[in-house]
Image: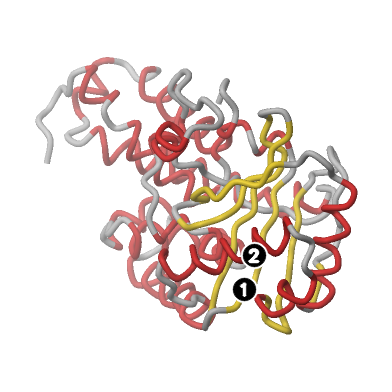
Amino acid sequence: MRTVGAGTDEIAGERRQLINVAYRLLGSVTEAEDAVQDAYTRWYGLPRSRQAEILSPGAWLTTVTSRICLDLLGSARARRERYVGAWLPEPLPDRTEWDHAGGADLTGPADPADQIVLDESVATAFLVVLESMTPAERVAFVLHDVFRYPFAEIAEVLGRTPAACKQLAASARRRVGVTRTPVTATGQADVVRHVKEAWETKDIASLVGLLDPAAVMTADGGGVVGTVLRPVEGGARIAQYMVAIADKAPGLELLERSVNGLPGLVARRGGDVMTVASFEVSDGSVTRIWVVRNPEKLRPWTPEG
């Protein structure tokens, strides 16, 4: 428990934790930053006497940020019904990897994405599963199972009893348990490297061999750039699509880079990141590919990040 009358530095020091919570709740770096900024605005809008009464500003900020995210999740479905094509979470780079591997200079001004810890709870496959939950399930599950907040505190966010929040988390956990496929980064890196090589040489047979027969590829262009609006299903169809794209995109450079903490591929032209692809690998085969091309979601991958 913090002491009464926390200082400005202590309050500002909560930002990283809040960004981590908000990104996992929303799947959007931009929306996460906005939610956290809104929470800080509300904190600094309190009378100083009220601030002094709050024993744990961090807990207060987490509760307010989570409530803001809950409201955003409630309206997200309506917003995404108007979204052109599939909606995917914003991919996260590992800037240290870029710094040491060369390529784009991602060492510009501090970005909210830099504050997000890259672990299994931000893997694309995990975030996509979170999208299938109700807003209340997602909040209960993320706060409890990822960040270990007690249900008594989660109850304050959701306006429900601790017992009800426990039920919500259990329901969400069942969704995750059925869908998640553990994979080591090393094993995935080997498969992704082979996909890159086959894609570059336009080797359809090799691509088909690397893709699960029931693989699915989902792309997010947001209506801003061209891409398939519906998922491409089947390893053979995905392989053919990838080779067709290679034919239409001369001069595209493929790079092996971490995406949300796991090996993925980045395509760029003239130094500009055009596409970020993340993968789910099971038993040595690619089962899912998520491709983000919407420029609005690639801002963390640009020098201006």
Residue 94 image-quadrant placement: top left
Which residue is denoted by mark 2 in the rendering? Answer: 195
Question: The disc labelled 1 sits on which kind of residue?
Answer: Val
In the rendering, which numbered label is found on residue 286? 1
The relative height of residue 44 versus residue 62 in the rendered view (above or below) is: above
| Quadrant the C terminus occupies | top right
Q: Of the residues tagged 2 and 1, which is closer to the observer?
A: 2
Residue 303 image-quadrant placement: top right
Q: Tell me where residue 38 appears, x and y as whole percent.
A: 49, 28
Marks 2,1: beta carbons within 8 A: yes
Q: Tell me where residue 111 appears, x and y as whole percent.
A: 47, 27
The relative height of residue 285 versus residue 251 in the rendered view (above or below) is: below
| Quadrant the N terminus occupies | top left
Q: Please state which of residues 165 and 282 is positioned toward the viewer in this rendering.
A: 282
Q: Tell me where residue 135 appears, x and y as whole percent.
A: 56, 59
The relative height of residue 269 versus residue 109 in the rendered view (above or below) is: below
Q: Please state which of residues 12 and 204 is positioned toward the viewer in this rendering.
A: 204
The relative height of residue 106 versus residue 228 in the rendered view (above or below) is: above
Q: Residue at x 66, y 39 (%)?
A: 297
